[in-house]
Image (tube, helix red, strand yellow):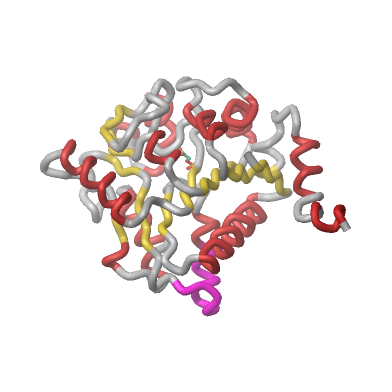
């Protein structure tokens, strides 16, 4: 795990966009797994800027959404489909045929989830998965207790998540109770994972994710078993990390191994 602690939310987003750009330079038809929520918004803004300055071409990029509320139509302003279009896709030159998403109202839920998994595989798997983290440690909508090898499926949101997400709806009662989400097992198959967190309210979840025991009670802790994970946090989200000085030291010395061997 590479833990990168930056001074501000803006810096996290710049760093995440920079990493994705570097990966794209190695593989132009990069397959991205994209999360919604407040945290990744800045990353999508950075990437949009790169696209508009002709530094980053999205024409061969493929995108898979991480999750979706069950019951919402695609054009519902709180659906994740709507979020992705409004905050990212409509501003960049990604092709519609390269955008895949979980539907809010599939006719056969199980078959839809199964097909989604197959679709990801047909593109060779996800190259870079972007994740936020819930205050309860969820990734995607894999709430505490989710199997660490779970696949794309229906989940019931916790009351805490419903309350946290009520800020996006006019009334808490409007927040869907169920969702579809890639499973933790699905996420873990991505070749690289970038998890972003900002603010003090995420500090306990980050502590459990990075330094806690690997447990279904803290779903993000599964990432400790992934070979290529970058945890990007601001000072506040990283404030409870016991080894934060070491993570900063590692970052400061990054790329210096070659010099050291001269
Ligand atoms: P947030 O959501 O980025 O809006 O805080 C993160 C999450 O719940 O996964």
Q: Residue at x 68, y 36 (%)?
A: 238
Q: Residue at x 27, y 34 (%)?
A: 153
Q: Is residue 166 visible?
A: no
Hey, which residue is sitting farthest front in the picture?
262
221 sits left or right of 247 in the view: left
Res 146 quadrant in image: top left
132 sits left or right of 97 in the view: right
Q: What is the magenta range?
A: 45-57
Q: Nearer the viewer, residue 256 or 145?
A: 256
- Residue 53 position (above or below residue 83): below
Res 161 quadrant in image: top left
Q: Nearer the viewer, residue 225 or 38?
A: 225
Magenta-drawn stretch contains 242:
no
Placement of the N terminus among the 4 image quadrants: top right
Magenta-drawn stretch contains 54:
yes
262 sits left or right of 72 in the view: right
Q: Residue at x 16, y 40 (%)?
A: 111
Q: Residue at x 65, y 42 (%)?
A: 2
Can you give x and y, in whole percent of width and height, for residue 136 in the image?
49, 27
- Residue 240 position (above or below residue 113): above
């Amino acid at each position: 795990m590479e833990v990168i602690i930056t001074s501000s939310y803006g810096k996290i987003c710049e760093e995440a966009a920079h990493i994705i750009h570097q990966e794209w330079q190695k593989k132009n038809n990069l397959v991205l797994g994209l999360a919604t929520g407040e945290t990744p918004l800045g990353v999508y803004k950075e990437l949009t800027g790169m696209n508009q300055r002709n530094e980053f071409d999205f024409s061969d990029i493929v995108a898979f959404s991480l999750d979706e509320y069950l019951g919402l139509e695609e054009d519902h302003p709180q659906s994740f489909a709507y979020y992705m279009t409004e905050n990212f896709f409509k501003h960049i030159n990604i092709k519609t045929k390269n955008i895949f998403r979980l539907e809010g109202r599939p006719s056969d839920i199980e078959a839809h989830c199964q097909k989604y998994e197959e679709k990801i595989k047909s593109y060779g798997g996800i190259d870079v998965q972007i994740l936020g983290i819930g205050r309860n440690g969820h990734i995607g909508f894999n709430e505490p207790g989710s199997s660490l090898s779970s696949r794309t499926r229906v989940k019931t949101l916790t009351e805490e998540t419903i309350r946290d997400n009520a800020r996006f709806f006019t009334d808490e009662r409007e927040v869907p109770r169920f969702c579809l989400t890639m499973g933790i097992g699905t996420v873990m198959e991505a070749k690289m994972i970038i998890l972003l967190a900002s603010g003090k309210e995420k500090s306990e979840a980050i502590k459990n994710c990075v330094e806690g025991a690997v447990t279904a009670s803290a779903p993000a802790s599964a990432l400790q078993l992934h070979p290529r994970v970058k945890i990007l946090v601001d000072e506040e989200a990283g404030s409870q990390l016991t080894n934060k000085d070491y993570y900063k030291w590692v970052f400061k010395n990054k790329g210096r191994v070659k010099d050291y061997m001269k």
